[in-house]
Structure formats: C-alpha cells, structure tokens
Amino acid sequence: MVGERGFEPPAPASRRQCSTRLSYSPTGAGPLARVRQRRAYRQGGAHWQAAFCSGSEMPMNRPPDNAPGNRPDSPERHYEWQYLDLMRRIWEEGDERIDRTGVGTRSIFGTMLRFDLADGAVPLLTTKRVFWKSAAREMLWFLTGETNIRPLLQQGVTIWSDWPLKKYRQATGEDISQEEFEARIVDDESFARLWGDLGPVYGKQWVDWPTYQYGPDGKYTMGPGINQVAQVVESLKSNPGSRRHIIEGWNVAELDRMALPPCHKTYQFHVAGESGQARLNCLLYQRSCDVALGLPFNLFGAALLTRMIADQTGLQPGELIWTGGDTHLYLNHADLVNEQLSREPAGHPRLAITRHAKSIFDYRFEDFEVSDYAPQSTIRAPVAV
C-alpha cells in the first residue's frame, strides 16, 4: 500500500509498526547484493557522530560534506544531520532480521538524538515534508484519553485506520476499501463504536491508568483512574527537582487489548536552572522505532507535548532527548533512504503556542503555529501492516 492521501500515511507505521524481532534471519539478499546496496553510501573519509549518555563519540562514516555548517564539530551544524547520520548508520551497519510484518528490517539497538527547543525551535525534518498538523491533532487526541479513531477521522486524520480496518476485514470477510471503511466510521456512530476502537492505547494510559481496590468481601473492584499527565504538570510546579516526572504508556496488564503496544512509551521530564531561567527538558524512550516513517512524526509530537507542559508550568523550553531501543529501517524502504540521504537539510522552522490554555487539556489545534518551514518534497514509501 502506498500512501497518497493528504498527509504521509506511512507515518503510522512509524509509530505503530513496532518491529519485534522474531529471529536473526537473512532476508534472501546475497552478500554481493548487500555490498552493492551499501557501496553507494560509502563515500569519503569523514566520520559519523554517535551520542551516548556518557557524551562519548565513536568513529563512523558520515556524508562527505565539509561545509562549515555540516562538520560534526561545528556549532553551526544543522540539527537534522544527526537524524540523517542515524539513518545512514542503520542502512550500512544494521543487523538484518525478520520482523513481525514479514518485510524485514535493518536494526541497531540503543540510540540517541538531542534537540534544543529554545526560542521556538522545533525538530521538523526539512529533507522531506513532515505532516505536523496530523501529529498535532493526534497529540491533542491522546490528551483526551480517547481510544476510538472516529474523532481523528472527523478531522481528516487517517493515521490509525489500518489496524481497525484489518480487524474488520478479518472478522467479516468483506473486502471493503479503506476510504469506505473510514466514511462508515464517520457517518455511523454505532459502527464506529463497534469497529473503530483501538483498545486502551496511549491516551487511555496517560490520563486514565486503571486502578483496582480491594474490598471487604475479598474481591477487587475498579478504582479511580490515574491521570499521569495532570500529575506531572502539578509535580513540575510543586516539586520541580523531583525525579518522578514520568508519563508511562506500557501497562503490561493491558497490552493484549491494545491494537498495538505503545512504541513511544515513556516520557520523563527534568527541570534545569532556577526562577525565570528554569528550563524544561524531556527524555522520550521509544522501545521500537521506524526511523524513515515514524521518527519524524514522533519527534514533532514529543516537542509539542514538551512545549505545552512548559507553557502550563511557566518554564522555558529546554532540550528534547530522544532515545531508541530497536531502531530500524524496513528493507522495502531502499528508495526512500537513497533519496533522503541525497538531500541536505536547510532552514530552521519555529513552533509557537499562540494562546495560554486554562489547562494542559484545553489546547486547540488553532493554538499552534509553525513558521519558517519550507521542506523538500514528500518521499512516499509502502506501509507494512
């Protein structure tokens, strides 16, 4: 399936096609074919730069561009080079394996990217268009705790349609198109209630984590849900030095009920500095990440969430630190990888929040404004479901 709608449909694969390693297995491409695929990227004698918690560096190949703004040690180096470096490293050096989709990936484990969010900076890729409006609408949807795709489809956001559609086709045997399925979800509330729900994904865990209470009869009953987002906002205000500012999506007891377990699973926040100069940092841990299609979407979403929380707590935007577990590229994305690695990043987009909302849950899409964003053309790729 190739995305042709008004946003980049492959993005859902990013966030939701969390690749689970089944085995170390060859993909069928022989050694010579793999050498030929990779030879095109091995040019020049420059080095990769990899960031670790220790701040150490390791030598790796990187694009042969000696312009001052592209050297690893240059303060002017464009923020996007680290993403392109990561993409190239995975494609050249990643382990090939069979994933749950059957497509196969090249994967590395344990990665990090860092982005400064000061002065409205936002980590939107410029070497291809990132459909940030869909990402923003999805983040607001998460914050409602909603788990049905109907509110998203009513806004023209179709990034979660693949999974309920697959379930419907398997259950009914009806060969319905995605467009027809989405139209029925929007037009028929009863149909949406039956077939549009994703289970207790992301937002449900964020704002209504289930609890259980032990009763005098020895039985457990459902207790009040825990709103992790509200708790983090309050704890940042009352106890900024705490090490417990965490939003967690990985509820082991409910994973089997989710359309897909959370990929961007853990957000931890940290306050640096004092008084009016205090900065809010966010570390996002993503257990599984499709670098080509999902990571660009995830980076914007995390930056937006950090900005909203900073706005609510009176803190300055600090740094977004993204960390990945299984960090991979799908083998059928060779054309995308080739094209994107041939491009050079340029420009510095800005994100503004134009209205201070009453609470973290009261922002509207119209409150967000992206400026100075002039990306290169969209690069489409097939989605493996």
Image (tube, helix red, strand yellow):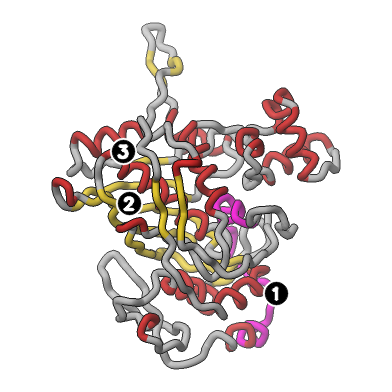
The Cα–Cα distance between marks 2 and 1, rounded to whole angstroms, is 40 Å
Residue 246 at what x, y percent from top left?
Answer: 33, 42
Give yes or no for residue 359 being in the magenta stretch: no
Residue 50 at what x, y percent from top left?
Answer: 37, 73
Residue 15 at what x, y percent from top left?
Answer: 55, 52
Residue ID for mark 1: 28
User: In this picture, is 292 found above or below 17?
Assistant: below
Which residues make up the magenta segment? 10-35
Q: Is residue 208 left or right of residue 197?
A: left
User: In this picture, is 257 found above or below 24?
Assistant: above
Q: In this view, does 30 lie to the left or right of 324?
A: right
Q: Quick one: label 1 or label 3, which is nearer the N terminus?
A: 1
Image quadrant assignment for residue 247: top left
- Dot 2: element: strand
Bin the neighbour count of mark 3 within 10 Å (Cα to Cα): few under 14, some 14-19, many 20 and up: some
Give the label on residue 312, or none.
3
- In front of the other: 256 or 356: 356
Q: Quick one: label 3 or label 2, which is nearer the N terminus?
A: 2
Three-letter residue code for mark 2? Cys
**Which marked residue is nearer to the observer: mark 1 or mark 3?**
3
Name the residue: 39% across, 46% down. Answer: 353
Residue ID for mark 2: 282
Three-letter residue code for mark 3? Gln
Three-letter residue code for mark 1? Gly
Name the residue: 41% across, 58% down. Answer: 350
